[in-house]
Image: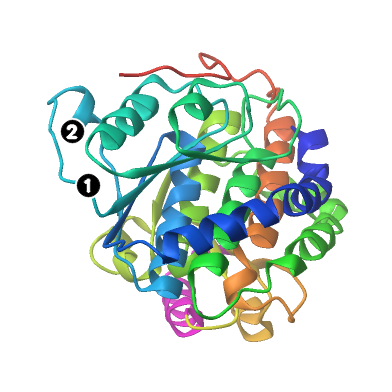
């Protein structure tokens, strides 16, 4: 897991170099069609990347985006009218049976289908009308890291190709490399959380998917019961679980979500909770019990990938501090097949 976390800047660079022209041509093709809806279908970490993709695509393109519920297709055999839709399947292996079944059904219903995968020979690549590849090499760790950020990168490239205003995603590999510089600081930080059994992870907007992803990483590698919320939703009831020293991890970049992050941190101070922020804002860092401070020139739109990398390192080192091998989580395997 640690090795694959460290590979991410190179993987991101390689994916841009290999896939950008294809994505540009795909964007030109899709802009020529009357697209009313984008549907994203995924499971696990890929679903968290898709949750990020939903925010990004809706904000940048103005096209409504839905996260598919695969059971609508696989259990209830629903036939949806998708002739003006793009359906995007997201899967590291490309072998998720239910994801591929949704893609095939959507294709039969008139949708244009896209697969985002790390496996060019996968079933997904054979089904989809167009395949966007993550150039990550084989991912051996059960806990996805480099393929998660590779999937997010493809959403950046696709959004930039579809939107009127381009996104400076070329900066992301360098920002990712800077995130790795926090490694020694994170090793020290995890000692404070060695005996953590429960926590809440909070993110909003572009980092909402990251809240889900870090919670998943903590559950699968550290066996920590981790709930995840947006900062807005957290005030609507879940705040009641917070007591003295209760740990809350917050993705809190400078930008549109800053005010809600500050409001939450001030309330957590009143409750004497343990707040740990991944941020690039000095005010947010000052209000937090603990923090990882990233460069302030990472704008909010580009923050999700460089912000998740310290979180991945935190999960990997916390597992080691707990005496758990993050590469051999109990009860799990690399490819999960559901229907």
Quadrant where the C terminus is found in the figure: top left
Q: Is residue 8 left or right of residue 32?
A: right
Q: Which residue is mark 1?
A: 82
Mark 1 residue element: loop
* 1 or 2: mark nearer the eye: 1
> Start and end of the magenta stretch?
257-275
Which element carries disc 2, helix, strand or loop?
helix
Could you say where residue 11 lies in the image, as x and y percent from the top left? 78, 45
Residue 171 or residue 321, whichever sits in front = 171
Mark 2 sits on what residue? 72
Quadrant into which the N terminus falls:
top right
Q: Tell me which residue sits at (25%, 32%) in the image.
A: 108
Task: Assess whether residue 85 is covered by the magenta stretch.
Answer: no
* Residue 33 versus residue 183 in the image, above or below: below
Q: Disc 1 or 2, which lies upstream in sequence?
A: 2
| Mark 2 neighbour class, 10 Å CA radius: few under 14, some 14 to 19, many 20 or more | few
Please determine whether, in this image, residue 114 is positioned above or below residue 43: below
Query: Residue 227: percent from the left, percent from the top?
Result: 40, 47
Which residue does the image show at 26% across and 30% down from the upper left? 105
The reply to whether residue 225 is visible in this rendering is no
Residue 115 position within the rendered picture, expressed as x and y whole percent measured from the top left:
49, 38
């Amino acid at each position: 897991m640690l090795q694959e976390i460290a590979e991410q800047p190179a993987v991101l660079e390689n994916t841009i170099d290999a896939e950008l022209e294809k994505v540009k041509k795909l964007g030109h093709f899709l802009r020529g069609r009357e697209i009313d809806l984008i549907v994203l279908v995924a499971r696990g970490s890929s679903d968290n990347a898709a949750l990020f993709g939903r925010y990004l695509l809706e904000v940048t393109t103005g096209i409504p985006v839905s996260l598919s519920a695969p059971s609508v297709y696989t259990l209830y055999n629903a036939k949806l009218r998708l002739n003006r839709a793009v359906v995007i399947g997201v899967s590291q292996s490309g072998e998720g049976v239910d994801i591929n079944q949704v893609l095939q059904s959507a294709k039969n219903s008139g949708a244009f289908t896209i697969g985002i995968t790390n496996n060019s020979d996968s079933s997904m690549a054979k089904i989809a009308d167009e395949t966007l590849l993550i150039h990550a090499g084989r991912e051996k760790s059960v806990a996805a890291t480099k393929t998660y950020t590779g999937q997010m990168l493809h959403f950046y490239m696709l959004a930039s190709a579809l939107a009127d205003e381009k996104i400076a995603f070329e900066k992301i590999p360098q920002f990712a490399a800077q995130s790795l510089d926090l490694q020694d600081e994170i090793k020290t930080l995890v000692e404070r959380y060695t005996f953590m059994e429960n926590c809440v992870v909070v993110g909003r907007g572009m980092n909402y998917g990251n809240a889900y992803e870090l919670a998943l990483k903590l559950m699968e590698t550290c066996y920590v019961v981790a709930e995840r919320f947006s900062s807005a939703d957290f005030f609507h009831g879940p705040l009641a679980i917070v007591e003295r020293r209760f740990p809350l991890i917050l993705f809190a970049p400078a930008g549109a979500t800053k005010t809600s992050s500050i409001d939450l941190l001030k309330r957590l101070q009143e409750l004497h909770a343990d707040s740990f922020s991944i941020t690039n804002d000095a005010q947010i860092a000052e209000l937090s019990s603990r923090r990882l401070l990233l460069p302030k020139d990472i704008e909010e739109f580009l923050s999700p990938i460089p912000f998740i990398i310290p979180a991945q390192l935190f999960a990997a080192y916390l597992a080691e501090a707990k005496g758990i091998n993050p590469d051999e989580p109990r009860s799990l395997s690399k490819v999960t097949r559901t229907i």
